[in-house]
Image: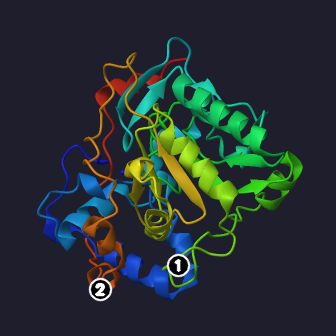
Amino acid sequence: MPGLLLRPPPLDCLTSFALNAAARSRTFPASKHLLRRLSAMNRDLLPATFTPAALLLATWLTAGVTGTALAGPWAEVTAPSTGLTKVIGGVSSGCIAGAQTLPAEGDGYVSIRRYRNRFYGHPDLLRLVSDLARKQARRGPDLVMIGDLSQPRGGLMSSSHRSHQNGLDVDIWFQLAPSAAVANRDTANQADPPSMVTPDGEGLSPLWGDDQQALLKTAAEDPRVERIFVNAAIKRALCASDGDTAWLRKLRPWFGHDAHFHVRLPCPHDSSECTPQAAIPAGDGCGSELDWWFSAEARQPAKKSSTPRPEPTTPAACRPLLSTN
């Protein structure tokens, strides 16, 4: 899913954004746009004695940011730093030195929304994208649409994510594109590809098919991938239909993620200052922990707090990246 702040606020200061959004997402389709602004945090990182307050904490730490004030200077940086690649900090509070650039097009893929300047990452991530796309190219002529990776030097973005900060995250859309031109045309005005989940949030839409499952399974079975965030309805359908559930362990349910899935890599060996996430629990994740996402508790709106959210703090080791080439 990792926290944005080094010291989180008291639970009684947290908002009800998570539960309120969870409920609204299954009642009002328009709210899905809001949920897509949540970055992917792994619910299994919450305490074993899970409470709604813990979910609120997780959501507070990962909720999408809409103002450039919180993003600070990171969104204004236009190019990666020079030198060796090094991941610093965590996915929700970090940066990346010497990031590599994902080409606009490659064998089997197209990088969309390049105007956002979020197509940078660790070399391991870029190799993963290329490998997944080449496997898709062997399946057919349609292209994988690659969404956001990280900014040139990582850091907090001005919209859509609290994670994606240290070059280890990438969004991959479920819908395939017939060509790069079509992909860029259809997403030019920030229009999202269609959801793969029914409007009630309970099951898969008719748009889900073999291509979508093959793409997701290929990513999950890659040993370089640590975890993948998907909508709970997608995971539940796969738990019920796929006899081989071993690969489903890496699929972690989270709000939104009904039109794309979010791939995350572990800390690379070349980055000692990278902050790792807790390990995924054992098992395929198809039991009661998945049932919660469809429970009354998950859908119950809660009152929203007026307490302002404190501004984020980045690791001290990231600061030199803002003043060097």
Residue 239 vertical placement versus 42 (above, below)? below
Q: Nearer the viewer, mark 2 or mark 1?
A: 2
Sequence-wise, which precedes: disc 2 or disc 1?
1
Q: Position of residue 10 (x, y in %)?
A: 13, 62
Q: Report the side of 321 relative to 325 (left or right).
A: left
Q: Quadrant of residue 299?
A: bottom left
Q: Residue furthest top?
A: 83
Q: Residue furthest left?
A: 49
Under mark 2, the amino acid is: Ala
* Residue at left offset 27%, top offset 47%: 5
Structural crowding at the residue carrying mark 2, measured as other residues with C-alpha within 10 Å and reported as few (<14), some (14–19) or many (≥20): few
- Secondary element at image label 2: helix
Under mark 1, the amino acid is: Ser
Q: Position of residue 301 (x, y in %)?
A: 32, 85
Q: Dot 2 corresponds to which residue?
A: 296
Residue 323 vertical placement versus 222 (above, below)? above
Q: Quadrant of residue 75?
A: top right
Q: Dot 1 corresponds to which residue?
A: 31
Q: Position of residue 58 (x, y in %)?
A: 28, 59
Evaluate whether residue 304 shows in this view.
yes
* Residue at left offset 81%, top offset 49%: 142
Q: Quadrant of residue 123?
A: top right
The C terminus, quarter of image: top right
